[in-house]
Amino acid sequence: MIGAPGFWSNPNGADHPVARLLSPVSSLYRMIDRRKRASIIPWRAPGPVICVGNASMGGVGKTPFAIFLAGLLAESGHRPGFLTRGYGGTETGPLQVAPDHCADQTGDEALLLARHGPVIVSRDREAGARMLFASDAADVLIMDDGFQNPALVKDCSFLLVDADAGFGNGLVFPAGPLREAPVEARSRADAVVVVTASEAAAVPADLADFAGSLPLFRAWLAPLAAAPETVVAFCGIGRPAKFHATLARAGYTLAATRDFPDHHAWRPGDLAELQALARQHGAPLITTEKDHVRLPAAFRETVKTLPVRMAVDDPTRLGELLASRLRAPQTTDRTGTR
């Protein structure tokens, strides 16, 4: 993860002097989070709520997986809609994303989700859910992130884990990369999804063991279309190496790469640097769809993207899990702990 200290990603990093120094702060962080969650009575929305989240900080593929779920639901006759915090945007919401919104307002994930259904941006998750269902634009709500947010009762929660990064050094922020202890996250999950580097990669044994009795799925990002050529790749995502590897599998030759922090706000100097790098190597620029929507319009036209979709090893079983959760009886009062 760009910008993260090296001991976060080291499985033995819990013994790092800085990690040990920060451990008391991590304990305080966990205590505050537990108290906050215990003090909130979740609101039961009038329709099913599906949550896609993770226990660690940084990208793991939540947005592509949310889009994949929306496709499954649409195929079965549902009208899925999305709820997102709008990370990186100025809008606090609740706000329904419109075609003329930009990433500076709503964040990049919201714009990608809006290609697949109605999207509400709201830092207040309950207010966002109320807006989505009141509009009658959707009959199922998919939360992109919000796994640690207790505001809504969740009917089905997917816990995503990156196969390569795992849980890093196993410690909670700031001593490690975790939002919460993995076992605590698993206790609120209905299924574990391990996101591997490719279709051919296997689920690591420790993550298979971690899933325990929960349904376990393997997912990966697959390129939709590619025109193999030599390119200069850049991105501002949590794990740039995954983008580089996807490009290579799609047949691209990487003349150079330039990595920026996740959700990076592009500055004129960044764009000038990228243009110079492209001229130096005589190759076009290419980036992720997520980064592409954040670029200034004029610059965006000169940059290629690699469209990808999330694929899952057993979509039939996943669809059956969703169907069973959607059939479960629901109430409309403030009850439930999921």
Image: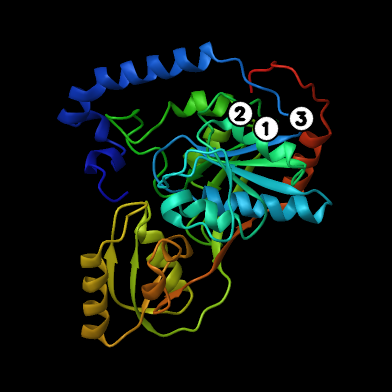
Q: Amino acid at mark 3?
A: Pro
Is 271 positioned to the left or the right of 318 in the image?
left
Q: What residue is rendered at 24% in x and 66% in y? A: 268
**Marks 3 and 2, Cα distance to the nearest angstrom?**
11 Å
First in sequence: mark 1 vs mark 3? 3
Disc 1 crowd, CA 10 A, few/some/many (<14, 14-19, 20+): some
State whether residue 20 is above or below residue 288. above
Task: Check disc 3 and report the residue beneath it.
Answer: 46
Image mark for residue 126:
2
Image mark for residue 130:
1
Which element is circle 2 on?
A: helix
Which element is circle 3 on?
A: loop
Tag 1 and tag 3, C-beta contact below 8 Å:
no
Q: Amino acid at mark 1?
A: Arg
Q: Is residue 175 visible?
A: yes
**Marks 2 and 1, Cα distance to the nearest angstrom?**
6 Å
Which element is circle 1 on?
A: helix
Between 242 and 92, the one lying in front of the other is 92
Q: How many marks?
A: 3
**Marks 1 and 3, Cα distance to the nearest angstrom?**
8 Å
Tag 2 and tag 1, C-beta contact below 8 Å:
yes
Q: Amino acid at mark 2?
A: Glu
Q: Position of residue 129 (x, y in %)?
A: 65, 34
Q: Nearer the viewer, mark 1 or mark 3?
A: 1
Image mark for residue 212:
none
